[in-house]
Amino acid sequence: MSSLNLTFYGFLAALLALTAWQQKESSPPQEIQAKVVSASNSLPLESVHVINLNTIVGAISDREGTFTIPAQVGDTLYITYLGFKSEKIRVSNDFIRLENSSIALTELAYALEEVVVRPYQLTGYLEIDIKYLPISTAFQYSISGLNRSYEARNSRSSGARKLLGSLMNPIESIGSLFKKKGLQLQKLPSIKQDENIRSLLATKFDRETLTALLQINRDDMEKLLNQCNYSEGFVQSANDLQILDALNLCYEEFKVLNRD
């Protein structure tokens, strides 16, 4: 066989491989089904949250531990369940081809520390006792249906004014941090729209799921919210859904101020 024919067949093989790769890349996600079980006894786990981190779509397992979620090869599934270690599963060809694939979650072991209860010494007179009770100054108000949260603050300056000051001050890193995390923060609207993900975040306080979704660590989240005038009390006590709403409002203000 001449070198010209070898070159032609080599080019043809490369062209076919490229076409197959393009078809694979452009193929839409398909519904895949799997089962979540406990690693200790292989029993199915109900109400396990499964999130496709690539498409920001959530699903919940049924009584049999089975869930169905759109995914394709290369996507990452984030599986989380209260009392169990969260897992990330990379979707492979075998995972899609094999039916009733099982995902085993490992139960967490909690070490309970000694707790000393110190009751308040109350007199029974409201006017006196109210002076000695601790009062939290951080409040988060949520209006159902608006997907927006409001926080009572003691600061005189608005969050937008403080954010603008940070953008104008080269010492502050808020502007660079927003720009650096721009691709991750663009996921915020998609996360807010998925009811399965929202219901999960409303029950979480550890920022673990938010970190997996946004690829932003907890320290950076707190830095962003502090620069947007959210109080330390709110940042530490809010659930993950409230933190998500706060980050979204903060990012929207940043985009407006940065554009102007």
Image: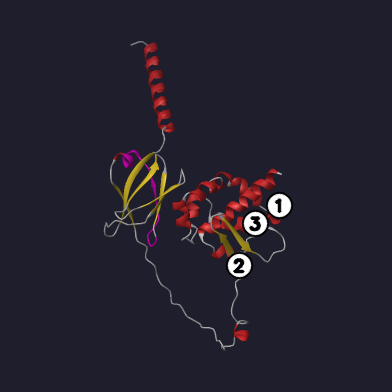
Q: Which residue is mark 1?
A: 164
Q: Earlier in the sequence, mark 3 or mark 2?
A: 2
How many numbered badges does the structure rendering display?
Answer: 3
Front tag of 2 and 1: 2
Q: Which residue lies at the image location 56% right of the left edge and 60% below the top edge?
A: 142
The local crowd at label 2, few if under 14, some if 14 to 19, many if 20 or more residues have their Cα within 10 Å, is: some
Q: Is residue 220 visible?
A: no
* Amino acid at circle 3: Cys
In this picture, residue 252 sits left or right of residue 110: right
The amino acid at mark 1 is Leu
Tell me, for residue 228, which label it has, or none.
Answer: 3
Residue reaching furthest to the bottom = 123
Is 3 situated above or below 143? above
Whichever of labels 3 and 1 marks the residue nearer the N terminus, that label is 1
Q: Could you classify mark 1 by the number of other residues whose Cα lies within 10 Å: few (under 14), some (14-19), or many (20 or more)?
A: some
Q: Which residues are magenta?
A: 82-96
Q: Position of residue 236 (x, y in %)?
A: 55, 64
Answer above or below: position of 117 versus 80. Answer: below
Q: Residue at x 67, y 46 (%)?
A: 256
Give the answer, above or below, for where 91 lies relative to 245: above
Q: Quadrant of residue 128?
A: bottom right
Residue type beneath disc 2: Ala
Is residue 94 found inside the magenta-colored segment of the image? Answer: yes
Residue 106 part of the magenta-drawn span:
no
Q: Secondary structure at mark 1?
A: helix
The numbered disc on residue 138 is: 2
Name the spot of residue 156 as percent of width and height, x first: 72, 63
SS for dot 3? loop
